[in-house]
Structures are given as structure tokens and as C-alpha cells.
Amino acid sequence: MAVGAAILCLVPLAACNTSEVLNQGYVVDEKSLELVPEGSSREQVLLALGSPSTTATFDNEVFYYISQKRVRPVAFMQPRLVDQRVLAIYFNEEDRVERIANYGLQDGRLFDFISRTTPTGGKDASFLGQILSDTVSDSTPGRPNM
């Protein structure tokens, strides 16, 4: 009898677990990304991927498409940042795609998931490190998430 009462009490609590996943920003679509191989024009990138989240000029222009993935384990809790990615499209002097990188954090370090490498220092790596550093600090227990 007591076991049955305990199960009846736990059933409503099990229904509270929503595990909601919230994606914000530009979520990379592999089919759209295939439309902009190296050598594509700036216009082709804009048509296939849309306007970038931000741009930068280090040596040449770079388009950055930023996305975040947050998880809310229970409906009334604040979502927690679990992943953040930056798709970077690098252009050469002729405004053609020179290379494409998909940056994120792996083991707490900046990592390019396309070339499977860790970028070296420089203005671009510092900029990306600043953007992606929020992933580590936002997922720290006890720290409020935005």
C-alpha cells in the first residue's frame, strides 16, 4: 500500500521534466553550407546563408554567424547555455570565399569543427575566444544564466 502511494506521488513529478532545447541565432544547415564552397562570391554567401550576425576586418573581411544552444531541464527553470558555435566565412582580396570554419569549444579550448584543429593566436582567435568564453562562464554552477 505504501509503495503504491509513493508511486502515485512520483508520477506527477515525472511529468514536470520537459527538457526543452532552445536554439538561438544562426543554426548551420549543411545543405545551405554546401552552396558556398571555397571560391564563392560574397553575394552567393549572402543569398545562401543570409546576413551574418556580425562582420570583422582583420586582413580581409570575415562574416560570423553565431548560434547558441540552451537547455531548460524543467519548465520553470532558467535555460542553461550548453553549446555556442561561430560559423566564420573568410574572404580574400577578390571578395571570394577563402575558407570556412565552424568554431566552438572542445575541452574548454577554441576548436574548428571543420578542419578539426585548434586555431593559433592572432586577432581572429582573440575575437572568437571572447565570443565563446561566455559558454564556459555561463555554464558555471551557481552563476545566473541570461
Image: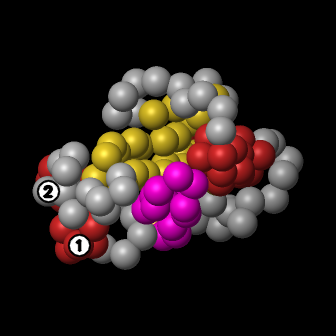
Does the segment drawn in magenta span residue 70? yes
Seen at 22% across and 46% down, the residue is 38
Q: Which amino acid does label 2 sit on?
A: Leu
Q: Residue 43 carries which label?
A: 1
Residue 58 location, quadrant = bottom right
- Closest to the observer: 139 or 3? 139
Picture layout, residue 118 above or below residue 54? above
Q: In this view, does 63 lie to the left or right of 73?
A: left
Q: Earlier in the sequence, mark 2 or mark 1?
A: 2
According to the picture, the residue beneath numbered tag 2 turns out to be: 35
Point out the residue furthest to the front here: 93
Tally of numbered tags = 2
Picture layout, residue 104 above or below residue 90? above
Q: Main secondary structure of the magenta part?
A: strand
Q: Quadrant of the N terminus?
A: top right
Find the magenta span and give its range: 53-72
Q: Residue 25 carries which label?
A: none
Dot 2 crowding, Cα within 10 Å, few <14, some 14–19, many 20+:
some
Q: In this view, does 92 lie to the left or right of 67?
A: left
Q: Which amino acid does label 1 sit on?
A: Glu
Seen at 52% across and 40% down, the residue is 104
Picture layout, residue 4 above or below residue 84? above
- Closest to the observer: 77 or 21? 21
- Closest to the observer: 96 or 44? 96
**Residue 34 visible:** yes
Q: How far apart are marks 2 and 1 (CA)?
A: 12 Å
Seen at 19% across and 68% down, the residue is 44
Tell me residue 140's x, y (percent). 78, 42
